[in-house]
Amino acid sequence: MKNVVGKAILGSAACVGLAVGTAGMAAAGGSGGRQVLQDAPSWTHTSSKVGAPASASALHMSVVLSLKDAAGAESLATAVSDPANAAYGKYLNAAQWRSRFAPTDATAKTVSDWLASQGFTVTGSPANHRFVSFDGTAGQADAAFGAQLATFTESGKQVTAPSAAVSVPDAVAGVVSGVTGLDSSAVAKPTNVGAGDELATASAKAAPMASADSKGTPADTLPPPGAVYRNSGPCSAYYGQKAAKDVPQILPNPLTYAVCGYTPPQLRGAYGLDASQTQGVDGRGATVAVVDAYASPTILSDATTYAKANDPRHPLRSYQFSQNLPASYTHTQECSASGWYGEETLDVEAVHAMAPGANILYVGGQSCYNNDLAAAVNTVLDNDLAQVITNSYGDTGEPASVADAAASHESALQAAAQGVSLLFSSGDNGDEIVHTGTRQVDYEASDPFVTAVGGTSLNVTASNGYGWEQGWGTGKSVLTSGSWVPNPPAYVYGGGGGTSQLFTQPGYQKNVVPARIANYFGQGAHRAVPDVGMVGDPSTGFLVGQTQQFPNGSFKYSEYRIGGTSLSSPLFAGVVAVANQVKGGSLGFLNPRMYKLSGTSAFRDIDHSRTVTDGVVRVDFANGVNAAAGKITSLRTINQTGSIYVTKGYDDVTGVGSPNGVSFLAAMAGGTAAR
């Protein structure tokens, strides 16, 4: 999805507020008894308009309702998250949030009645009335919102979006922040990178597969697991184990074969958690919610099998895992539903790897559309279901529409107010320049009430110790006729980071983030991303186990290496769950505490020259499963990060650094950390 960055959202002295996109913005425009909520997406001005959707085309939409007291909600969220504030840790529960800040039942009814009067079918509103969901047609949407929906060619795909400003009557304008579901480009993508650079997706010809692990009768039948991807050899059991002496050496340090995939004991050892977990400090008592789209039909059996095979001291017990799934699913082909199974599997297995005693709740979105994923996050918050939420997806760039940010930002405020740590992966396209032509950060990671988790490359030693970390940024060359082509390697992906143009600098980043990052665009200090880093490089990635479809049509459990900040976020969520156990309660919104600890022993400061000194060699099956079609040998560099780079102190690849084991646990729980 191509987004064009919108106007900066001005911040309060303590943190950052959403100063536009609420009723105040609505009042700024419109005439004749209607008020403008949001303009047509900016990208529509530069994309080719090729027609209009059929008037009867079905749409699933939501109206986002404004908070009763948005300024008060932000003030409270800031206060309970600041260790220096007397209100620190005095969180609300969901019912208290609804009482103080949520739109009233009467407000929701007013909007619902208006929608019904326009011919829409209202499908419901959660208890906190974050939104009112409804179904209708493109023709009804045009008539009700003046959207003038059109079909555009955008990034090689045909998508539907408003070609005119979206407006509503005066009668409801004061309580409505925006409308979602009109822009079909507003879909999230999983931020994972598999052994073959992208996670394999389901075969369109595969037969449906029955599920014992999911519930509901979907409107769209969920597809079976996708085509198998298996790693070829040689590969290393730990970083640097096998030297790649048989290939040209073009980097300062000798090349070695990529790891086969780190296991849970290796990652706990490297991040300093394994010793503490032999004493029962393993996240027990905490619940981590994993939010993704759809639901893998084999998740429980896969995660159980994986833990038994790779972490036998820490099995995943059935009572530790539960699911909250929608009654139906939509857009399964458009969203490549089976590709999300790998994301879910990675997230669940990564959380359990770092916090084997924690409970894991999987919450599935009805589709990969932003409004459906936002609804899944809201389910967790509105029902007090977890203390940590990890989200391994995001948009490319920041919202074109402030209204798109309003719904997610309100959820971020509620999470902070209720003491829920809300994590998002920072993205897998680095500074986005190679992929979009424009330096930008990804949303929701850039929201100032979100903890954005960036990616590193990790050296785990033979004894499961910490060797080093560098910034995750990968250049690739393929061995062709005895030479690496291209030389130097071309950038392909890396941990997302940079500077927001939507959010001004939150208070917790002041005096920590260098001015060259905060004021990168010369518009004053703005939110910098990410906040923290953990391993994300697939060449130093994580071994996962998942049921996949083999060429003969059979479905079998198989293992492969994977990475992306989709790995970084759930790993950090597991660490936070363990820290919650140490504290004896929820740490809530993490950033204010973490930035106060920047430069202390709580974090490993990831500092490396901008010179690319290291790389690994990967050998992959050309067909992803066996040697029938040959093998491909490639060089993958480390720390090739583009315009963002690691440096001493805060940087826009790894944030304040990576968590340093028991020092991090103790310091986040309220102890001291050495400088």
Image (cartoon, helix red, strand yellow):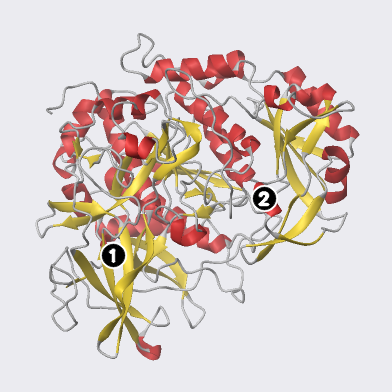
Residue at 54% across / 18% down in the picture?
A: 73
Q: In the image, residue 551 lies at what x, y percent?
A: 48, 82
Left or right relative to 33: residue 124: left
- Which element type, helix, strand or loop, lies under badge 2? loop
Q: How many marks?
A: 2
Is residue 312 among what the camera can see? no
Q: Is residue 589 visible?
A: yes
Locate the C terminus by quadrant. top left
Q: Nearer the viewer, residue 667 or 279?
A: 667
**What is the CA distance from the residue labelled 2 to the residue labelled 1?**
37 Å
Element on which disc 1 rests: helix
The residue beneath circle 1 is 539
Report crowding for label 1: few under 14, some 14 to 19, many 20 or more residues within 10 A (C-alpha). many
Q: Nearer the viewer, mark 2 or mark 1?
A: 1
Q: Is residue 348 left or right of residue 263?
A: right
Q: Nearer the viewer, residue 465 or 434?
A: 434
Q: Which residue carries the number 2 mark?
A: 328
Give the residue at x 43% y 82%.
623
Outermost residue, front direction? 522
Specify the label residue 73 is tagged with. none
Q: Residue at x 32, y 76 (%)?
A: 477
Residue 179, quarter of picture: top right
The residue nearer to you, when weighing 499 against 101, is 499
**Could you tell me which residue is drawn at 22 percent across and 78 percent down?**
234
Instruction: Give the x, y percent position of residue 597.
Output: 23, 28
Q: Quadrant of the N terminus?
A: bottom right
